[in-house]
Image: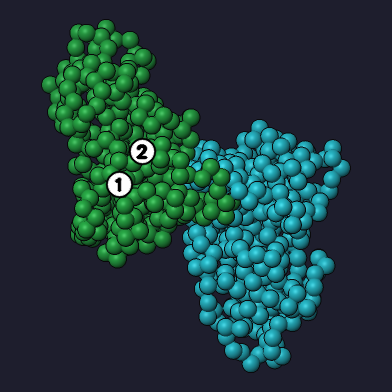
Chain colours: A green, B cyan
């Protein structure tokens, strides 16, 4: 095998009460990458379509992730990477995670899979570090492992795959505004009331229970973020209206995807999810704001090979 | 049926990362109560053996809980309660919860079970309120429902029964010191770092996952309390030594039971649990401190009828 074409899905991190620890993988929305072996050692990014991103390997999240993997293995050949972005940078649905995970997944395939999907997370996190300045796995973990993932501890990479009910669908609304990660971060309170911390604990614990027992109502009651959303939501156009509309149209819960500006909702059944997506879209129309919207099932496989030769 | 004799088990609340929301029910350690119908309306406490507690119904947690139940139903008869305490007051293993739950469970039996075990929680919480000054269900919920319970929301009584692996056993060490609830509370920080709140979320989420999947290692890795134990442990004699000894003897995790002074540990298998209990006891011997110790399986049934007539 000398060349792989892969699909690198988008993902939703944070998931309301799962701030910084929970994420899930989307289906269909994503990038494509072609990675091929070359006699020239190292990583060369030869094509980027759809977004204006750096070609220099050390400045590109795919490059950095790939280099990190190659640092653990010695190969006398290298890799050429073509990136076809389907996910907008800065959308909050894991654009950098898709590229980071894509590079290491593709290279791993071409090397005969020396690493498991879970083991690839630590390399992909290097890309995330370049993109955001801090290490986190709540996007790359679901992209690589599929479904819902829980990061118990980032340092020991203690990451758990969670089950989820099969009728769970996501709606995504991406309002095209620029939201700097630094702004999303600066609104966070570094100290929070103990009472709120306990509420967040109770909700994430119940959400996990709901995922195991396929209890949609419990999932719905638990999708509450008392620590971060109250502050970050001000940065997102019409967030409260989007949330209200989503709820009125039958969603289980609505929150900020990653650090925004995308908003996600979870619904039981594709029909409800599609109506939630469409009605949330209508909220943004009067604002004269360009936006993208998607309805997606939860992707239980994660990143995948499209073809190889 | 005019009289019931019931077993009211002890319980462990908080459970490390489950501060204020998680609890589990113990087996064998507990009180007994005899409750009988009387022609005289209201609640009369006629006997208390083993502890020095108020007989006046309105000042006794069993009385207050029973009155709260009777306020919802009109009966032209009343109830007489005898309490045989096996659980020491102020031990941190749910002494007031056992009496509160006992009263409402027994009265409910004598009335032909108009309420479910879950519905009885709100009445038993009145006793807890009298005992501690605040409403909480993390002891009465496991006593009434058995096993592990999660309190998502106390106001709506959104309480979830959790599964647990059958080889899970608890060790309890109760050093006989007086620890005032007000002291246990005053050491708590009312504001906590966001980072710690996230760690606590990650651990409770993982603990729930471990309980569902019977993953003892994950349960062990998750039994960490970064919000409360660091402060409260100073109030408990030799806490760090107890914890270290417990871990060295193979326990999965160790923490403060309720607001202390009892310390609990969880282990896989009765043999390990017994050795953990015994070795933790040895830590307290040189301190010349009176203590009680127990090894108990997790009680999946909760409070139960011993006999009736």
Quarter of the image that includes the C terminus of chain B: bottom right
Element type at mark 1: loop
Q: Is residue B67 visible?
A: yes
User: Residue at the right extreme?
Assistant: B288
- Between residue A160 and residue A90, name the one nearer to us: A90
Identity of the residue drawn at 87% across and 42% down? B288
Residue that numbered label 1 is attached to: A262
A262 lies left or right of B28: left
* Total marks in image: 2
* Chain to which mark 1 belongs: A
Q: Are marks 1 and 2 in contact (CB under 8 Å)?
A: no
Q: Is residue B110 above or below residue A186?
A: below
Q: Position of residue A129 (x, y in %)?
A: 39, 28
Q: Is residue A77 above or below residue B254?
A: above
- Between residue B303 and residue A8, name the one nearer to us: A8
Q: Position of residue A83 (x, y in %)?
A: 19, 27
Q: Quadrant of residue B66?
A: bottom right
Residue that numbered label 2 is attached to: A180
Q: Is residue A84 above or below residue A17?
A: above
């Amino acid at each position: 095998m000398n060349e792989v074409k892969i699909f690198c899905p988008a993902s939703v991190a944070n998931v309301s009460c799962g701030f910084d620890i929970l994420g899930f993988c989307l289906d269909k929305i994503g990038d494509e990458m072609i990675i091929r072996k070359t006699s020239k050692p190292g990583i060369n990014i030869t094509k980027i379509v759809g977004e204006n991103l750096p070609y220099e390997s050390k400045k590109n999240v795919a490059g950095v992730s790939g280099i990190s993997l190659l640092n653990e293995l010695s190969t006398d050949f290298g890799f050429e990477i073509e990136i076809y972005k389907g996910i907008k940078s800065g959308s909050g649905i894991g654009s950098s995670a898709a590229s980071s995970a894509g590079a290491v997944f593709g290279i791993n395939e071409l090397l005969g899979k020396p690493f498991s999907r879970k083991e690839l997370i630590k390399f992909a996190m290097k890309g995330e570090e370049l993109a955001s300045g801090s290490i986190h796995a709540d996007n790359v973990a679901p992209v690589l492992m599929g479904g819902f993932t829980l990061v118990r501890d980032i340092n020991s990479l203690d990451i758990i795959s969670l089950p989820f009910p099969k009728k769970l669908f996501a709606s995504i609304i991406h309002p095209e505004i620029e939201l700097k990660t630094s702004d999303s971060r600066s609104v966070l309170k570094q100290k929070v009331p103990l009472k709120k911390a306990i509420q967040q604990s109770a909700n994430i614990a119940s959400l996990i229970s709901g995922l195991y027992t396929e209890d949609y109502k419990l999932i719905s009651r638990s999708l509450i973020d008392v620590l971060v959303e109250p502050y970050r939501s001000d940065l997102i156009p019409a967030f409260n209206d989007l949330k209200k509309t989503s709820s009125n149209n039958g969603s289980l819960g609505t929150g900020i995807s990653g650090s925004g500006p995308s908003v996600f909702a979870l619904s039981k059944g594709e029909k409800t999810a599609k109506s939630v997506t469409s009605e949330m879209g209508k909220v943004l129309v009067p604002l004269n704001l360009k936006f993208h919207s998607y309805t997606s099932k939860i992707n239980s496989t994660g990143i995948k090979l499209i073809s190889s030769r």
